[in-house]
């Protein structure tokens, strides 16, 4: 897993409001493919497994946000 690649991609998206808006507007079934395409274009080492694991972690964090 390339945590560095995923973090680099996140940083790019956070730094580019237009890119972030474009991703936000995607249908869920297209989101992962678009992320992987963007990562490949920019040379970030991100795999489908990276995206899936990040999604699971984000969902868990969201569900546990009030428990802490």
Image (cartoon, rainbow, N blue to C red):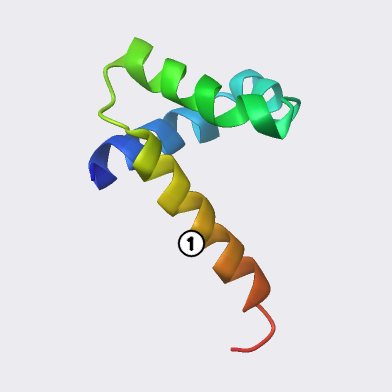
- Left or right, residue 20 beside residue 36: right
The local crowd at label 1, few if under 14, some if 14 to 19, many if 20 or more residues have their Cα within 10 Å, is few
- Left or right, residue 58 beside residue 9: right
Quarter of the view holding residue 9:
top left
Q: Position of residue 59 (x, y in %)?
A: 60, 62
Q: Residue furthest bottom?
A: 68
Tell me: residue 20, above or below residue 4: above
Q: Nearer the viewer, residue 20 or 26?
A: 26
Tell me: residue 17, above or below residue 55: above
**Which quadrant is home to the C terminus?**
bottom right
**Which quadrant is home to the N terminus?**
top left
Total marks shown come to: 1
Identify the residue at image location x=38%, y=22%. Answer: 39
Determine whether the residue tagged by mark 1 lies in a helix, strand or loop. helix
Identify the residue at image location x=56%, y=69%. Answer: 60
Q: Position of residue 42 (x, y in %)?
A: 33, 15
Quarter of the view holding residue 23:
top right
Identify the residue at image location x=72%, y=25%. Answer: 26
For mark 1, what is the residue?
57
């Amino acid at each position: 897993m390339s945590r560095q690649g995923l973090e680099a991609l996140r940083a790019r998206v956070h730094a580019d409001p237009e890119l972030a808006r474009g991703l936000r507007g995607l249908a869920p079934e297209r989101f992962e493919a678009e992320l992987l395409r963007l990562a490949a274009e920019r040379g970030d080492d991100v795999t489908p497994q990276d995206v899936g694991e990040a999604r699971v972690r984000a969902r868990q964090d969201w569900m546990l946000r009030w428990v802490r």
